[in-house]
Amino acid sequence: MEYMVLPEQDGMRLRDVLRRVMGVSYTAMKSAKWNGGITVDGVVTPVDAFVRAGQVVAIRFRENAPAYAVKPYDLPLTIAHEDDWLFVIDKPAPLASQSSALHPDDTLENALYAHLRCPADFVYRPVNRLDKGTSGLMIVAKDAHIQHRLQALLHTPAFIRTYQAVVEGCPDDDCGVIDAPIGKEDAASIRRIVTASGKPSVTHYRVLKRGKTRTLVELTLETGRTHQIRVHMAFIGCPVVGDFLYGTEIPQLPGRFALHASALTLHHPMTGDWLSLTSPLPESLATLLD
């Protein structure tokens, strides 16, 4: 990552440019310092040095290789946006976001590795994860610093994610807020439930279209609990269509359910620009609305 010192920053200490201007965390700065990763005009420089206007400050982050071997997965990807710092990928479903014991080599991680032609220094850094059965927009950072900066913006006005879902039944109101704490059903279960002992969880919904027995809703989150939308919609009696865990699986949606990450608005921490992207509701979900 590079930054050219502005005239009004002339005479600042290098560490202040890194921390206050470039947003580098203390931990990342310390790690880069001991590995010769901090330079001014290409020369390794101590962080207490003063910098001058026009000089180029650069910091290189050492990436830790994953503790497992990543295998390529030949799956075409839709890259909604790419810049020097991040990818925004329109994830299909069903597709797991990250490798696991259940999905060691058929995930978005493996597909991105193949898309990038299997680089030796590949490290997968998802910013927001989507369930295997959820499709839509998902951000993957290109280095640890960017991942940290982006994750710090989650659930703030600088990083807004919008979902669309087809749900069973019809909510009573055209819009509403579901404020109900979510916790694990039990220690061994992957299911979550609304429980007084759970963590605070807030979901906003807005009805987009009502059918005879199903409804298309738009959803935004104030919090990011596991399965939050799925749990909250089931809690108000309108489970996501096809949700095998909180509703009923249907043959029209093998391996997935009717939840889609449809929009993303981000105040880019590196460029300062606003990034706004949308992804249309898949036809397989739109046709569920009777």
Image: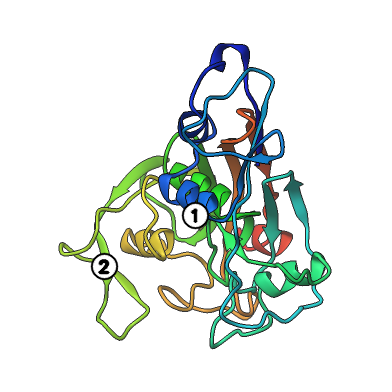
- Secondary structure at badge 1 equals helix
223 or 196, nearer to the observer? 223
27 or 185, nearer to the observer? 27
With respect to residue 5, does 102 lie above or below?
below
The Cα atoms of the two marked residues, 2 and 1, are separated by 36 Å
- Secondary structure at badge 2 equals strand
Percent across and percent down for residue 79 are 76, 54
Label at residue 178: none
Side (left or right) of 22 relative to 113 = left
| Residue on which disc 1 sits | 31
Percent across and percent down for residue 187 are 26, 82
**Residue at 32% of width from left, 58% of height from top?**
236
> Of the residues shown, which amino acid type is indicated by label 2?
Gly
Identify the image quadrant of the N terminus: top right
Percent across and percent down for residue 282 are 70, 58
| Residue on which disc 2 sits | 183
Q: Residue 213: in sight, yes or no?
A: no
Side (left or right) of 49 relative to 275 = left
> Of the residues shown, which amino acid type is indicated by label 1?
Ser
Q: How many marks?
A: 2
Question: Badge 2, how many Cα within 10 Å: few under 14, some, many 20+?
Answer: many
**Residue at 51% of width from left, 40% of height from top?**
159
78 or 66, nearer to the observer? 66
